[in-house]
Image: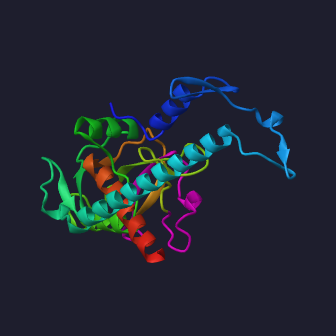
Amino acid sequence: MTDGIWSPLLEDLAVSVISRDQKVMKNKPYFITRPEDTPAVGGKKEVTETDLYLLGAIEKLVYRVDFMEKRLRRTEELLYHVMANSNKNNEPCPTNFSRVGTYCYHFSERELNWKSSASMCRALGSRLAELETVEENQDVVAHMQATSTLRGKDFWTGGLNPGLLWIWSNSARPVASNYTENPSNNNNIKGNGRCLKLAYNPTLRGYEYQGSECSVRASYVCEHEENSTSRALERIQKSLQEKKILQ
């Protein structure tokens, strides 16, 4: 097991300091003056052995933190280059899943309630789809519109409303609103239910998010389990890109 950065420092401190009044140095008992007993010289207190020891410990800590920061920066740069050079579109999707845009999805033909739909997705080694970006939403909707067997059906997603805000059930991230003028405010998603569907609107001839009773039967969209990891890495990559711009 590898020790953390604090272990050596804490071990040094534990074996070196016997008590508040005594310190071991080179196997000989050595008594130091307590700060409150230290005589003042020229209006200033003398620097005690304890002060020097603590300064040394702080110096070691600063060195270790600086070392870890450098390692973290190197790791971030490596991750950035790995993500920049990766091409996920060449990876095949699992059986019964289709590549839509960047990720792999399964579009069901059966109609089930939300809970059963979530169970079916787990049985496929996946979860109900969580469309965390505008681009991902557009890719999935465009695929459903272009596929005759899917077009016009309602599909369960992984969205839930516990009471105040629509969130994705797995990542707990907020669901982006249907409305582009204020996408962060998802309280305007239509419907009174607590489970989220991609519902077909015949008037608009398009899809939009709709809250529905979880007991309602509908088709469902599963996303491949690795999609969430890929999106997490993409968020890290985006954060690193923004960090580089600010530097």
Query: Relative to residue 244, is residue 234 depicted above or below?
Result: above
**Residue closer to the observer: 106 or 241:** 241
Q: Which of the 4 image quarters holds residue 205?
A: bottom left
Residue 88 visible within the image: yes
Magenta extent? 177-206
Q: Is residue 186 magenta?
A: yes
Q: Image quadrant of residue 104? A: bottom left
Along the horizontal axis of the image, is 42 left or right of 190?
A: right
Whether the magenta-drawn stretch holds residue 20 is answered as: no
Colouring mode (rainbow / by chain / secondary structure / one colour):
rainbow
Q: Could you tell me residue 39's position as x and y percent?
A: 83, 40
- Identify the residue at horizontal 18%, vertical 51% (top origin): 97
Q: Position of residue 56 (x, y in %)?
A: 56, 45
Q: Residue at x 32, y 64 (%)?
A: 77
Give the image location of residue 47, x and y in percent.
72, 45
**Left or right relative to 225: residue 165:** right
Q: Residue at x 39, y 36 (%)?
A: 115
**In the image: residue 206, left or right of residue 57:** left
Q: Quadrant of the N terminus?
A: top left
Task: Name the magenta segment's main secondary structure.
Answer: loop
* Residue 234 in view in this figure: no
